[in-house]
Image: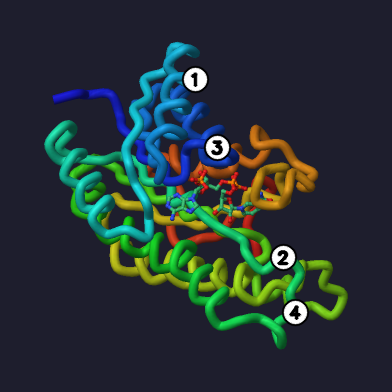
Amino acid sequence: MNHQKTALITGANKGIGFETARRLGINGFEVLLGSRDGQRGMKAQSVLKTEGLNARFLLLDVTKQDTIDAAASFIEQEYGSLDVLVNNAGISLEKGISPSRLETAVLKETFETNFFGLFAVTRAMIPLLIKSEGGRIVNVSSGLGSLERNSSPESASLLALAYNSSKTAVNAMTVQFAREFKNTPLKINSAAPGYTATDLNGFRGTRTVQQASVVIVRLATLDENGPTGGFFEDTGPVPW
Ligand code: NAP
């Protein structure tokens, strides 16, 4: 058995997920790079390996249960447990469509990845995380999922029913799972990386992926006194 800590990051082939994998690799983790595409996953693996990091691509489409099951079996056989799960894979589809014009199909597709996919991966990996001495789950949410920020009269939050509500639902999942495991070493939190320049927003974000990954890495590496069931950005807690 390998004694280096292991971290699985979904959607790790680019953007915030890739940078998070790099940072966790630098922190001494063996990083398992979840990617739904073999070529993109292998490319990410080879970049991190060139940097001297212990990185391994894993085929993982969060909307395809067979790839989730195969990834969980692989981790079980190779490592016996999992220390960190970063649920990072996410999509944003509505591109400025107002709530009253949103197609149900777009709402469903967004939830399929951002919410149901995150749930399916979490459910499959929990048995492995429980076997770790101190498992950590970081759900990559968004400040756009904050109901308080969305509903404040002077809200500057983007109006995006599908994306924003999928992240609100992710936060609800964080709270529910954290309650279930509150008397165990497992800690489960939501992270808001901030508006970051990635493919998700046509690189219009104002923050770098390095800045975005800070809060995610912090929550992935919490010690036993750290919080669980919370929602954080790099400056502190985010209102629900
Ligand atoms: P990104 O560059 O578009 O990366 C998204 C990643 O998710 C890609 O690796 C993508 O894979 C993957 N992905 C999408 N659907 C998937 C699926 N079904 N199965 C597996 N992987 C899938 O976007 P990003 O900005 O880094 O986003 C990462 C996370 O941060 C998302 O959850 C996003 O909602 C959140 N976030 C982003 C911002 C921001 O301003 N950028 C702000 C707050 C929160 P492919 O390459 O195959 O498409």
Q: Three-letter amino acid code at disc 3?
A: Lys
Instruction: Looking at the image, tell me whether mark 2 or mark 1 is earlier in sequence order.
Output: 1
Q: Residues within 10 Å of mark 4 (few under 14, many from 20)?
A: few
**In the figure, 71 relative to 147: above or below?**
above
Q: Three-letter amino acid code at disc 1?
A: Val
Q: Which mark is residue 14?
A: 3
Q: Three-letter amino acid code at disc 2?
A: Lys
Q: Residue at x 42, y 32 (%)?
A: 39
Q: Nearer the viewer, residue 183 or 194?
A: 194
Instruction: Looking at the image, tell me whether mark 3 or mark 4 is earlier in sequence order.
Output: 3
Judged left or right of residue 211, residue 112 is: left
**CA–CA distance between discs 4 and 1?**
39 Å
What residue is pinned by disc 1? Answer: 47
Residue 3 image point, x, y percent: 22, 24
What residue is pinned by disc 4? Answer: 98
What residue is pinned by disc 2? Answer: 95
Judged left or right of residue 9, residue 196 is: right
- Residue 63 falls in image quadrant: bottom left
Q: Residue at x 43, y 19 (%)?
A: 46
Q: Residue at x 63, y 57 (%)?
A: 237
**In the figure, 48 relative to 149: above or below?**
above
Ligand 1 within 8 Å of disc 3? The answer is yes
